[in-house]
Image: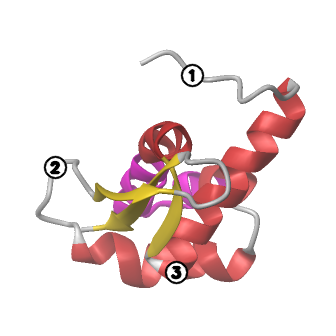
Amino acid sequence: MAHSKFGRTTNQRKALLRGLTTSLLKEGRIMTTVTKAKNVRPLAEKMITLGKRGDLHARRQAASFILEKEVVAQLFDDIAPKYAERNGGYTRIVKVGPRKGDAAEQVIIELV
């Protein structure tokens, strides 16, 4: 899937996706729109794969993308070891229904 632009500049779009990825790893599940969830999914899975690698270079790569140091530590210590036997597919997208204000389709993206 080609990345959506969300009507934002490149820097704003990257900041949005970094923030959503950080929140997903921190909370375990977030509610957002379908398009944002589909754009966050590969980024979150990449971070978990880095966590599974577990070396210093992978930790620095993750730290350069994730906004909070505590979340990086949580990723490498708690989240990634749970997926040691799993080859991808770390997230799930569940449709919730339309948002009340603008009827945008809402989903919950969560770690499996």
Residue at horizontal 56 percent and vertical 78 percent from the top:
26
Q: Amino acid at mark 2?
A: Asn
**In terms of depth relative to the viewer, which is nearer, 21 or 69?**
21
> What's the magenta region?
44-60
Residue at horizontal 76 percent and vertical 64 percent from the top:
67
Q: Amino acid at mark 1?
A: His
For label 2, count other residues whose C-alpha is less than 10 Å away and answer few (under 14), some (14-19) or many (20+): few
Q: Main secondary structure of the magenta part?
A: helix
Q: Determine the image quadrant of residue 56.
A: bottom right
Choose the circle earlier in sequence order: 1 or 3: 1
Mark 2: which secondary structure? loop
Residue 82, above or below 57: below
Image location of residue 96, percent across then percent down? 36, 61
Q: Quadrant of the N terminus?
A: top left
Q: Determine the image quadrant of residue 21.
A: bottom right
Query: Would you name the residue on which mark 3 appears?
Result: 27
Spatial separation of the CA atoms under disc 3 and disc 2: 22 Å
Residue at horizontal 58 percent and vertical 52 percent from the top:
57
Mark 1: which secondary structure? loop
Q: Is residue 102 left or right of residue 36?
A: right
Query: Would you name the residue on which mark 1 appears?
Result: 3
**In terms of depth relative to the viewer, which is nearer, 108 or 55?**
108
Q: Residue furthest top?
A: 2
Query: Would you name the residue on which mark 2 appears?
Result: 87
Spatial separation of the CA atoms under disc 1 and disc 3: 24 Å
